[in-house]
Image (cartoon, rainbow, N blue to C red):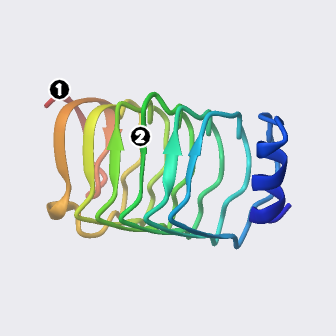
Amino acid sequence: MDREELIRKYAGGEKDFTGRNFRGSHWVDEIIRGGIYREADFSNSYFDASGFDEVDLSFAKFIRVRMYESGFGKTCCLEGIDFSYAIFGQCNFSGVNLSQAVFKNATLGEVSFRNVDLSYVDLSGVERFNEVSFKNVIFYETIMPDGSIYTDSI
């Protein structure tokens, strides 16, 4: 399913896109509000000034996505989402559940995590980690970029 078909179906009232394939799609100035995208595949997609609010993206694949000036907010469920090798620039994760998410070898340029659960998250190999800001974040058995395990609240 391509981006245009998703937008058309969503406008027609469809809200469950569980397991659907959106690989390689391009999103510019688009905010997706509401809906279920569990286990959907957005790998190799591009997001610019776009994002998600109040959606279930648990266990979705965002492998090798590029996201710039984009974000996830307003109670998004991102549990178990896979951001391996993704590139983020000036992105925001606010009020979301990221427990069990995978950020292996991702680049986090100027990324902000606010009111986020990072329990059991894999951040191994993350680049530009020194540019990340944290506020009201839970770390529990979180794998840090250097491979160490971290538990704390910031």
Q: Is residue 102 above or below residue 69?
A: above
Residue at the image point whose x is 62% and y is 39% from the top? 57
- Report which residue position mark 1 lands on: 153
Of residues 139 and 46, the one nearer the viewer is 46
Element type at mark 2: loop
4 sits left or right of 80 in the view: right
Badge 1 crowding class, 10 Å Cα cut-off, few under 14, some 14 to 19, many 20 or more, is few
Q: Quadrant of residue 28?
A: bottom right
The number of discs equals 2
Q: Nearer the viewer, residue 143 or 40?
A: 40
Determine the image quadrant of residue 130.
bottom left
Left or right of 72 in this view: 140:
left
Seen at 13% across and 31% down, the residue is 154
Q: Which mark is residue 112?
A: none
Left-right relation of 150 to 16: left
Q: Amino acid at mark 1?
A: Ser
Q: Is residue 29 left or right of residue 130?
A: right
Task: Tell me which residue sits at (51%, 57%) in the image.
Answer: 83
Q: Residue at x 42, y 31 (%)?
A: 74
- Circle 1 SS class: strand
Q: Label 2, label 1: how many angstroms apart (C-alpha)? A: 14 Å
Q: Amino acid at mark 2?
A: Val
According to the picture, the residue beneath numbered tag 2 turns out to be: 121
Where does residue 89 sit, x and y in percent of width and height?
Answer: 33, 69
Whichever of callouts 2 and 1 sits on the residue coming sooner in the sequence is 2
Q: Quadrant of the N terminus?
A: bottom right
